[in-house]
Image: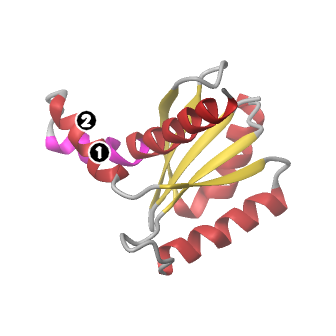
Amino acid sequence: MRYLGLDLGDKRVGVAISDKTNTISNPYQIISQENLFNELETIINQENITDIVIGFPKNMNNTVGESAKNVLLVKEKIENNFAVKVYLQDERRTTIAANEIMQQSNMTRRKRRQKVDEMAAAIILQTFLDRSEKNAN
């Protein structure tokens, strides 16, 4: 069992992967939205992924907007095309948190722009893993 985290954007998708113990999330890569399903198939097979966690972008007032509706469509497509479980994880403020973490590590603005999506995916996945561990105890 291994988890994959996704931060879906309009053009790019940040991808994170759990370690083999499903304790720590690591940034993995960025893939283009247009190659999402081909890339997912490759990653699922190469990394033995059994579960996918997708960031669910609710509005700050807890309503479901257009971006969240698009995530629900992608979730359904993944469930219909791959033998994996798919979970939604609230992703409010993850991009802000990702930028803050990278800024604190003195990463240049250019490098942050390149890495923010996969870092946000890692935060989404880590939040899910922490919550799952907490609920297991």
Residue pointed to by mark 2: 101
Q: Is mark 2 on a helix, strand or loop?
A: helix
Q: Which mark is on residue 87?
A: none
Judged by its main secondary structure, the magenta piece is helix
For residue 48, what is the image quadrant?
A: top right
Q: Give the CA distance from mark 1 to mark 2.
A: 6 Å
**Residue segment shown in magenta:** 109-118
Identify the residue at horizontal 58%, vertical 67% (top origin).
71
Check the image and report above or below for 87 versus 47.
Answer: below
Identify the residue at horizontal 68%, vertical 56% (top origin).
37
Residue that extends furthest to the bottom in the rendered view of this protein: 66
**Tag 1: residue type?**
Ala
Do residues under tags 1 and 2 come within 8 Å of each other at their CB atoms?
yes
Residue pointed to by mark 1: 97
- In front of the other: 2 or 13: 2
Could you tell whether 40 is left or right of 27 in the image?
Answer: right
Check the image and report above or below for 103 versus 75.
Answer: above
- In front of the other: 90 or 7: 90
Asked whether 25 falls inside the magenta stretch, the response is: no
Residue that extends furthest to the top in the rendered view of this protein: 21
Residue that extends furthest to the front in the rendered view of this protein: 137
- Which class describes the residues within 10 Å of circle 1: few (<14), some (14-19), or many (20+)? some
Measured as percent of width and height from the top left, residue 6 is found at 55, 49
Check the image and report above or below for 124 versus 64.
Answer: above
Could you tell whether 88 is left or right of 15 in the image?
Answer: right
